Amino acid sequence: MPFTALGLIPPLAQAAAKVGYGEPTPVQREAVPAILAGRDVLASARTGSGKTAAYLLPLLQKLLDSRHDGRRDVSMLVLVPTRELAAQVGDTLQGLVQALPQQPARPLKIAVAFGGVSINPQMMGLRGGADVMIATPGRLLDLVAHNALHLGSLSALVLDEADRLLDLGFADELQRILDLLPARRQTLMFSATFAPEIETLAGRVLNDPLRIAIAPESETTAVPDIAQRAIEVDASRRTQLLARLVKDEKWTRVLVFVATKFAAEIVADKLRKAGLEAEPFHGVLSQGKRSQVLADLKASRVQVVVATDLAARGIDVVQLPAVVNYDLPRSATDHVHRIGRTGRAGETGVAVSFVTEESEAHFRLIEKRQGFSVPRERIAGFEPAPRADVAPVIDHAEVPGTGGVKGKRPSKKDKLRAAALLSAGAAADDEKPS
């Protein structure tokens, strides 16, 4: 089915083909006609399914049809959770505009804004207004506070990765932004899941929306194109195993997920000492450094990028062959986002999870909630050492109010009890006759 069959004008369909969009994906086939018809949309589809083009293509067509001379007031606002995703959406939209067979008489002005960098250049870029604003919520509110833009003429609002906008604590900012927008507008929500929080938000901001839920099995970029592996290893030997895998599997590029910024720095440093081109990627790095790391990864100048979850959202690297969960993700949803970095656009990929004895229970919970089971592997020379004692564990996934899957680990009280038992045992040994 060509894009023109969905209602796109031939020049825009040609531009889509020129930048690499061939046949429409399932989410695009359902979303594009509805958006062109002016309907609100609530769509759930996995990472890499084509959600960005599903809203950019029809909104761009409506924008080209409706623009008029005079001052540019923002008519299309895209809110995203991270700076990387903001830049990615901006690049995608700019690429579509530049690929049009004939440029519009009045050039389209696209503004991208996010925190972590000086606000002054972004304010300067908004002089004279903008047709499209792509921003993170906090920086958008900063720009509004500085009277750098006005949202009174907005006709379309997109909440991209809406689940992450809520997960990252943007609920208050979202409400403040919604209060600034005209009541009559088209609103689109795209998310990887239909979590309860998403349903609540949709009930507040959407008007009789078309609900789109694309199951992974129905897509060409579905999970079967991602070969999942779970390798048992001691926590202390994960870096050595990672270096071995990168070399033995001949991965040209690999994205490694860790739990903290500190871990990203340490693991990247150890990989460099092992002879690999590796760089950390986390929120403390400057925007310039983060952009450079991404550019180097895409150009294969860097072989391994060690990233935190937050920083890695929005990373889109074509033909990324492998993703490694050095630290397991916090939740089953995060697992979906992580492995979705590979196996994109019909390519195949591999997702490797390191499973330690301490994290085995957590990985089983992820498997249960995602409805899959991954056979455990052991790599010769990296087999876990046998352990006589296992610390008591608590299944936080079964405790209300813990905020998602956290796996099993001893609480502070458990650790104190274990220490007391060890001390008592040592004292008893001291009292035995020699």
Image (cartoon, helix red, strand yellow):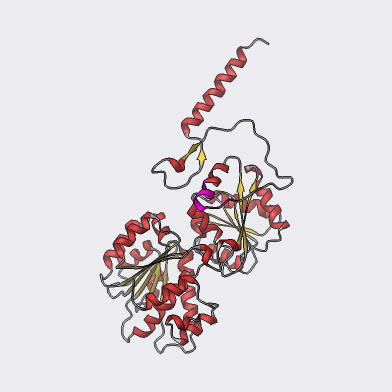
Determine whether, in the image, residue 248 is placed left or right of residue 351. Answer: right
Residue 279, percent across and down? 61, 58
Determine whether, in the image, residue 355 is placed left or right of residue 103. Answer: right
Magenta stretch, overall SS: helix
Residue 231, percent across and down? 65, 48
Residue 78, percent across and down? 39, 69
Residue 105 placement: quadrant: bottom left
From the viewer's perspective, is residue 379 above or below residue 155?
Answer: above
Observer able to see residue 259? no
Does residue 96 belong to the magenta stretch? no
Observer able to see residue 70? yes
* Of 302 and 196, the residue lying toward us: 196
Magenta part of the chain: 365-373
* Residue at the (50%, 68%) spot, across then down: 49
Determine whether, in the image, residue 95 is placed left or right of residue 110. Answer: right
Quadrant of the rendering where the C terminus is positioned? top right
Residue 152 placement: quadrant: bottom left
* Residue at the (48%, 56%) spot, across then down: 310
* Of 27 and 288, the residue lying toward us: 27
Does residue 366 belong to the magenta stretch? yes
* Residue at the (42%, 40%) spot, across then down: 399
State the count of labels: 0
